[in-house]
């Protein structure tokens, strides 16, 4: 058996109860075949892939907190420190009832390659909890965040592991966690990113993932002789990534006609009103029915359905496995040109293959949503030098990083005879730097 097949079999056997992690590992290892085959003997002897697929360490802990009725609640917290070959562990904290160790491992694994693609010195990690911030009071969220950080603070630090936001974790949660870290450890350091601007946050971090997604999409389209101007765009999600992707796509002249949340979706043929969407989601933390109530041009539908709307470009920005094979078929039938992932692994493996086989330009999340973590790394730099850069400076760096990522993944795919396969390109380009660092640092 080839080395890749050997490792795939072992990973499947060891992690049988973690389907999301297996899906992520399979995508990466399959893409790496040509690279591994060129160095098969050396990589096998060094157990490079086994080491890459096994986290450095993972923490699982109890998070007790008291709700507004005086009842004690107990959640489970996780932090997976996957790989720190090229820098301190870096990756978000997901707060969602679906969170389990397999989901955190898939996200941490993806983060290794994503962070490498940014060109900045950050390793891969991820954390989270099955806590659901939805419907909780600010005090309950604070109680949870303080309890979560009371344990997490033992494992993190500005040069060790630097968490940030993800689903369910935004500026409010990061603020409460930062306060608790400071209180226990007594150290004012850049231990979290996505902080508020008054205490060490970076301008443009809030916008960065969505903006970065649109910057790389524009670069992809330009490389194929077109751009976003006048295009119809379909977006899923209505959170941090979706909102700023919609905003930037509109600034570049596209018409974005959908968004969604976990209960329903909006079709707004006149184009999404971003200010209204922000008011509904960022200020009121309400459902999309409130958007519909204030926007006569919009339709609201229960359930899922954005992928049935005819579009030129699709940007999945909600969660993993939200774009399935049937959705891909519908998008292709409707003439979609490009699909770029804002979320982590939103497209299933069979849907990805269908899109690629049918000539759709497809960029996977570890490349196209890397603008968020890249700007987190810029926040770390600013914290280290105790300075803060202007919005324009950070935004210009973000644009440069996204363009570089596009050209690097494009070039890596070409180098291995897979021109236009940006999934292979992203996995290969991300892997090369990490592999080089791992080999240089000996067996660890
Ligand atoms: P938010 O919590 O701000 O928003 C998530 C959005 O997706 C909400 O509209 C939410 O709906 C919807 N959603 C979440 N889970 C589900 C689900 N199981 N089914 C249907 N809809 C769902 O998160 P972000 O925007 O930050 O994250 C979105 C995606 O982008 C995630 O995959 C995340 O890992 C990825 N990402 C985020 C980065 C960041 O900087 N924030 C960086 C890179 C990637 P509802 O409000 O109803 O829950
Ligand atoms: O998936 C991701 O890249 C994020 N949630 C952002 C991580 C970060 O450290 O900014």
Image: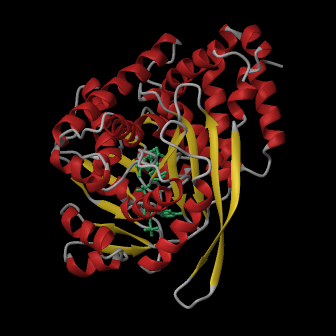
Asked whether, in this view, residue 350 is left or right of residue 137, the answer is: right
Q: Is residue 26 above or below residue 194?
A: above
Which residue is at the far bottom? Answer: 69
Residue 29 position in % (x across, y down): 66, 28
Residue 357 visible in the shown view: no
Asked whether, in this view, residue 362 is left or right of residue 252, the answer is: right
Residue 265 position in % (x across, y down): 38, 68
Asked whether, in this view, residue 9 is left or right of residue 249, the answer is: right
Q: Nearer the viewer, residue 157 or 325?
A: 157
Residue 175 position in % (x across, y down): 39, 61
Residue 60 visible in the shown view: yes
**Residue at screen point 24% across, 47% down:** 203
- Colouring convention used in this rendered image of the protein: secondary structure
Q: Quadrant of residue 291?
A: bottom left
Query: Quick one: quadrant of the C terminus?
Result: top right
Which residue is at the far front? Answer: 186
Query: Quick one: quadrant of the N terminus?
Result: top right
Q: Is residue 182 above or below residue 421?
A: below
Q: Is residue 158 above or below residue 92?
A: above
Q: Quadrant of residue 289?
A: bottom left
Q: Nearer the viewer, residue 119 or 159?
A: 159
Q: Is residue 435 above or below residue 19?
A: above
**Residue at screen point 52% across, 74% down:** 143
Asked whether, in this view, residue 102 is left or right of residue 296, the answer is: right
Residue 433 position in % (x across, y down): 53, 19
């Amino acid at each position: 058996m080839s080395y890749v097949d050997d490792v795939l079999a072992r990973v499947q056997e060891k992690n049988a109860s973690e389907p999301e992690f297996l899906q992520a590992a399979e995508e990466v290892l399959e893409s790496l075949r040509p690279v591994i085959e060129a160095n098969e003997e050396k990589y096998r002897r060094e157990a490079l892939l086994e080491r890459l697929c096994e986290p450095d360490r993972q923490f699982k802990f109890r998070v007790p907190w008291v709700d507004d009725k005086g009842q004690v609640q107990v959640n489970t917290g996780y932090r997976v420190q996957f790989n720190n070959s090229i820098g301190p562990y870096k990756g978000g904290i997901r707060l969602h009832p679906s969170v389990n160790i397999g989901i955190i491992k898939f996200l941490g694994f993806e983060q290794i390659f994503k962070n490498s693609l940014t060109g900045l010195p950050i390793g891969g990690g991820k954390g989270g909890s099955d806590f659901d911030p939805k419907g909780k009071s600010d005090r309950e969220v604070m109680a949870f965040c303080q309890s979560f950080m009371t344990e997490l603070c033992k494992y993190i630090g500005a040069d060790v592991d630097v968490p940030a936001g993800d689903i369910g974790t935004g500026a409010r949660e990061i603020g409460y966690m930062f306060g608790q870290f400071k209180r226990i450890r007594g150290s004012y350091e850049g231990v979290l990113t996505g902080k508020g601007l008054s205490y060490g946050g970076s301008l443009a971090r809030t916008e960065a993932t969505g903006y970065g997604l649109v910057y790389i999409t524009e670069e992809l389209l330009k490389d194929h002789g077109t751009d976003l101007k006048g295009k119809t765009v379909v977006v899923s999600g209505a959170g941090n990534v979706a909102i700023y992707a919609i905003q930037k796509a509109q600034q570049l002249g596209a018409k974005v006609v959908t968004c969604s949340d976990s209960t329903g979706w909006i079709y707004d043929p006149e184009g999404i009103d971003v200010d209204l969407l922000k008011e509904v989601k960022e200020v009121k933390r309400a459902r999309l029915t409130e958007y519909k109530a204030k926007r006569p041009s919009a339709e609201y539908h229960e359930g899922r359905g954005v992928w049935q709307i005819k579009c030129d470009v699709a940007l999945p920005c909600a969660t993993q496995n939200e774009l399935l094979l049937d959705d891909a078929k519908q998008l292709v039938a409707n003439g979609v040109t490009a699909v770029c992932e804002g979320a982590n692994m939103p497209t299933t493996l069979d849907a990805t293959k269908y899109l690629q086989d049918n000539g759709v330009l497809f960029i996977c999340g570890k490349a196209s949503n890397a603008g968020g973590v890249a700007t987190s790394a810029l926040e770390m730099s600013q914290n280290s030098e105790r300075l803060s850069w202007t919005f324009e400076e950070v935004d210009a760096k973000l644009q440069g990083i996204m363009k570089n990522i596009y050209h690097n993944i494009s070039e890596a795919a070409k180098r291995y005879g897979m021109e236009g396969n940006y999934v292979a390109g992203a996995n290969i380009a991300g892997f090369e730097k990490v592999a080089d660092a791992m080999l240089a640092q000996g067996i660890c």
